Amino acid sequence: MGIIKLLTPEISNKIAAGEVVERPVSVVKEFVENALDAGAKNITVEVKNAGVSYIRVTDDGCGIAPEDIDMAFLRHSTSKISSAEDLSSIKSLGFRGEALAAIASVSSIDLFTRRRGDSSGILAKVNGGAVTYKTETGCNFGTSIIVKDLFYNVPARLKFLKSNKTEYGYISDIVERLALSNSSVSFRFISDGKQKLFTQGDGSDLSVIYSVYGSDYSKFSAPVDYRDGSICVRGFVGGRQLSRPNRSFQTVFLNSRYIKSKLVTDAVEEACKTKIMVSRYPFFVIYIELDSTMADINVHPSKLQAKFSDENFVYNSVYFAVKSAFENFAESVNEICSHIDTSCSGQKNLNISSVCNTANVSSSYSDFIQGESEAKLRMPLVGDIDLSVFDGSTVSDMNLVTDSASELYDKLEDSAPCQPELQINSQLSYQSDEDNFKIIGQVFDSYILAEKGSNLVMIDQHACHERKFYEQISNESLPQLNQLLLIPVTVMLSKTEAALVEKYMDDLFSVGFDMEFIGENAVIIRQIPSNITSGDVKDTFLAILGEVSCGSHKLSFKEKLIERLSCRSAVKANKKLSEDEMRSLVSWAFSVRNADTCPHGRPVYHIFTKYDIEKIFKRV
Ligand code: ADP
Ligand code: MG
């Protein structure tokens, strides 16, 4: 008995209306979706001339009953929904019952179909929207549908098509995405007789990523796996090395359906923000499974858009899923080097990229915090004393504080009971007995060279220091070490600056500035973040305020503040460092898992293996 029914006008009117066939890719998409809905395990897409002259999609799905064939080509005929209630919990890719009718009206179609259990198949020819010929035929189980001469009767739409290259690009893109969302289905894509894509259909998302994007993307992407009540976020995301100049390598699936979602894209990009440089975009394939009552995909005829009933919930889930993916995937330089060394002992032909992770964010700061507790007490500073930014400078800093300054400090402390406790040395001192690296020196006063096992690691001193500060300031669980000023500084503000300070007083306080308005356009600053090490407090404060107010729109005020503070406080390029200073920085960079990029996504270090170097000198 047939299963395809005509939807009543009451139901069809509730479906977002619109034409689905604009170009060859629309045909491919609709046919493949039908094949998937039919439960196919193997799908072959063949196109000629970018689909304009020929499109064939063959599947091994359930096939169509002979008595359903005429009905299938009628508008609003579908086997997938039958009541208006079904619309709120759509599980199939199709449900509008329009595609075959729409495609048939602008092309000639040959349909071969055979259900399992049927002794023979059916060949139907459809012209101008109506089935004109039907006969029994021998064919495989499943359905093979061929479209010839697309838009032969609508020349305007033919004219509207772009170049073959562009139309081909659209098709290959959609086939890749459909393959990515269905790893248990084997896809074969053939264009003008050449196989362009083959996926195993072995149920592994990574195996499809390998087929679609190549081995680097399957090896170096961080796996995403997050579940929270009614949502599950899976997939893969790439760090700096896999980033792209545009968003073409970004894919989101909602309940196995490819969608375009600014909300999801924003959440992923936000989570990757400090891993990837401005104007680069992360690679990702994200699969979201969400209770279908919490997402509506019947927003637009293309079914590419989704409306979430709880946008914050989806955004936060995706954000945390990606953040923790990086955390779990990250490796420190120490770990990477020891992997290289282990692999090198047995294997000569080693490529550094095959052992380095591409994405690193650390969640573990135990060593880091331990270093903090060893920091020495430092007396308050007078105004703009230029501190060295490294641990080795602590003792000499102490010498700068005079007796009278210390008395002054006592008074200040008494008079300001609610001020934050005087903090100890703010510098991130990291000491480890396992520092088994050798500092070779500094190059161009900007890069530190260190030997670690059989690797030479080159570190960008500014990028590294910037990341170190960034982690300290932005990690709320770390004690924030601020400097009480011996002599509070009064800063006159413009109206805009005053408004900014008033609005973001809490954010300024949370990063270490403690101040109070005296009058409408002036503040008295009593405490500054300890990382501010150079220049005049007043100038620095105003400069930071200026930079933050015109920085990226994507970041919150506090994020911009942290970013600016880290950048300003970090040691610059072209600055000579002592061995202790270098050691302190390298020790930190090697042991934490998030030192691979500065907060702007620039690389912090590069590892040259011994093998890389010996290759240059033709020793291997
Ligand atoms: P929809 O997919 O929205 O239901 P279509 O116009 O794409 O509408 O298809 C109409 C009907 O034809 C489907 O509901 C399905 O029953 C049947 N059909 C189309 N393609 C296939 C296929 N490859 N295998 C099995 N049945 C199919
Ligand atoms: Mg369909």
Image (cartoon, rainbow, N blue to C red):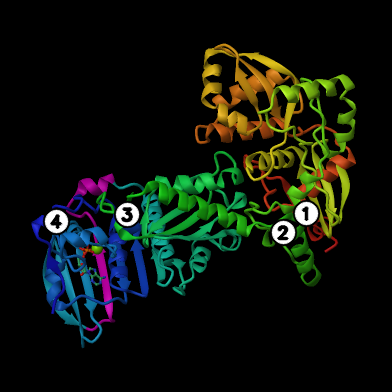
- Give the magenta-colored segment's residue range: 138-160
Q: Nearer the viewer, residue 90 or 424?
A: 424
Q: Which residue is mark 4?
A: 12
Q: Is residue 217 left or right of residue 189?
A: right
The amino acid type of the residue labelled 2 equals Ile
Q: Position of residue 547 (x, y in %)?
A: 60, 25
Q: Residue at x 23, y 80 (%)?
A: 114
Give the numbered dot on residue 608. 1
Q: Nearer the viewer, residue 35 or 437?
A: 437
Q: Residue at x 85, y 36 (%)?
A: 577
Q: CA distance from mark 4 to mark 2?
A: 57 Å
Q: Position of residue 242 (x, y in %)?
A: 58, 52
Marks 3 and 2, the one that precedes in the sequence: 3
Marks 4 and 2, the one that precedes in the sequence: 4
State yes or no: discs 4 and 2 in contact (Cβ < 8 Å).
no
Q: Position of residue 241 (x, y in %)?
A: 62, 51
State yes or no: discs 3 and 2 in contact (Cβ < 8 Å).
no
Q: Residue at x 59, y 60 (%)?
A: 216
Q: Which residue is mark 3?
A: 295
- SS state under label 2: helix
Marks 3 and 1, the one that precedes in the sequence: 3
Query: Which label lies toward us, 4 or 2?
Result: 4
Q: Which residue is mark 2?
A: 352
Q: Which quadrant would residue 194 be assigned to in this image?
A: bottom left
